[in-house]
Image: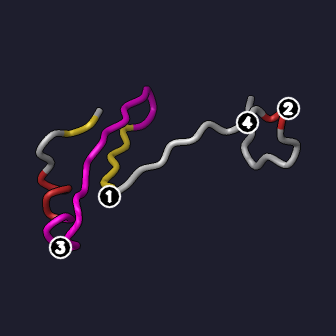
């Protein structure tokens, strides 16, 4: 969820001079808050397609 009019993002933007955004990700076990100026999302190949992967998939 993107936090509209985030005070934390506004403070970083004022200090650094570029736009910042705040997003919150809530799960059963974690509540993550991200303050960022840019975000790139890419899909990783499945472990079977990439034998040298560094992620463990149960």
Q: Residue at x 18, y 56 (%)?
A: 8
Indicate the quadrant containing the C terminus: top left, top right, bottom left or bottom right: top right
Q: Quadrant of residue 17?
A: bottom left
The percent coordinates of residue 15 (x first, y second) are 17, 73
In the image, 39: left or right of 2?
Answer: right
Whichever of callouts 4 and 3 sits on the residue coming sooner in the sequence is 3
Marks 2 and 3, how far apart at CA: 44 Å
Rate crowding at label 3 as few (under 14), some (14 to 19) or many (20 or more) other CA atoms within 10 Å: few
Whichever of callouts 2 and 3 sits on the residue coming sooner in the sequence is 3
Report which residue position mark 4 lands on: 45
Marks 3 and 1, how far apart at CA: 12 Å
Q: Quadrant of residue 5?
A: top left
Q: Quadrant of residue 36?
A: bottom left
Instruction: Report the disc number at residue 56.
Output: none
Residue furthest out toward the right: 51
Indicate the quadrant containing the N terminus: top left, top right, bottom left or bottom right: top left
The percent coordinates of residue 35 (x first, y second) are 30, 54
Marks 4 and 3, how far apart at CA: 38 Å
Q: Nearer the viewer, residue 37 or 9?
A: 37
Magenta-tinted stretch: 12-30
Report which residue position mark 1 lands on: 37
Q: Nearer the viewer, residue 34 or 43?
A: 43
């Amino acid at each position: 969820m993107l936090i509209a009019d985030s005070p934390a993002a506004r403070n970083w933007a004022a200090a650094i001079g570029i736009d910042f955004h705040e997003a919150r990700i809530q799960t059963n076990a974690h509540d993550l808050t991200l303050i960022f100026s840019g975000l790139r999302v890419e899909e990783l190949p499945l472990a079977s397609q990439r034998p040298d992967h560094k992620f463990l998939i149960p």
